[in-house]
Image (spheres, rainbow, N blue to C red):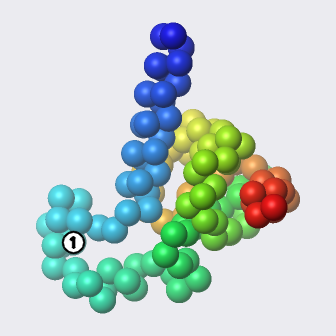
Amino acid sequence: MAMAKTKLARRNSLFKALQRSISWPNSSSSSSSSSFSSSSRLSLVPKDVKEGQFAVVAVWGEKATRFVVSLSCLSNPLFLRLLEMAEEEFGFENRGAIALPCQPNELERIIREMAV
């Protein structure tokens, strides 16, 4: 039971870090962010990232490949494990694409299996 609570607390921490990583700037993050207008906030998100999606980068050695994935990936246990590994290896201090420690073809397989 204690192990399940620890795992749940870790997952909640992971989701909060992910949310900070992909969220819009707000007035509490810096004094200048409160001056962002709605239109300038939109320019912070790359054009290929649509509503309900976020960007990740599969990083393996020297090779890094960027993917735009659906928020539905957050319900996939394999993808969640990659996020946990990413937090352990890289942390979630940056804003923008999240680095996942896996081979690009591994991430492609996870995404493909979710589409079926």
Residue 91 image point, x, y percent: 50, 44
Q: Where does the image place residue 99, in percent across and percent down from the top left?
A: 61, 55
Q: Is residue 115 visible?
A: yes
Secondary structure of the residue carrying tag 1 is helix
* Residue at the outermost top position: 1
- For disc 1, the marked residue is 33
> Could you tell me how many numbered marks the image carries?
1
Tell me what residue is drawn at x 58 percent, y 83 percent: 48
Residue 44: quarter of image: bottom left
Name the image quarter holding the C terminus. bottom right
Vertical position of residue 81 compared to residue 113: above or below? above
Quarter of the image for residue 107 reads bottom right
Q: Residue at x 53, y 86 (%)?
A: 47
Q: Position of residue 82 (x, y in %)?
A: 66, 44
Q: Is residue 53 left or right of residue 26?
A: right
Residue located at (76% from left, 63% from top): 115
Q: Nearer the viewer, residue 46 or 64?
A: 46
Residue 60 visible in the shown view? no
Q: Which residue lies at the image location 67% right of the left edge and 47% below the top edge?
A: 76
Q: Residues within 10 Å of mark 1 (few under 14, many from 20)?
A: some
Observer-nearest of 86 and 50: 50
Q: Is residue 44 left or right of residue 75?
A: left
Q: Residue furthest bottom?
A: 39
Against 20, residue 2 (above or below) is above
Q: Which one is in front, 44 or 11?
A: 11
Q: Is residue 57 left or right of residue 35?
A: right
Q: Position of residue 83 (x, y in %)?
A: 60, 45
Q: Amino acid at mark 1?
A: Ser
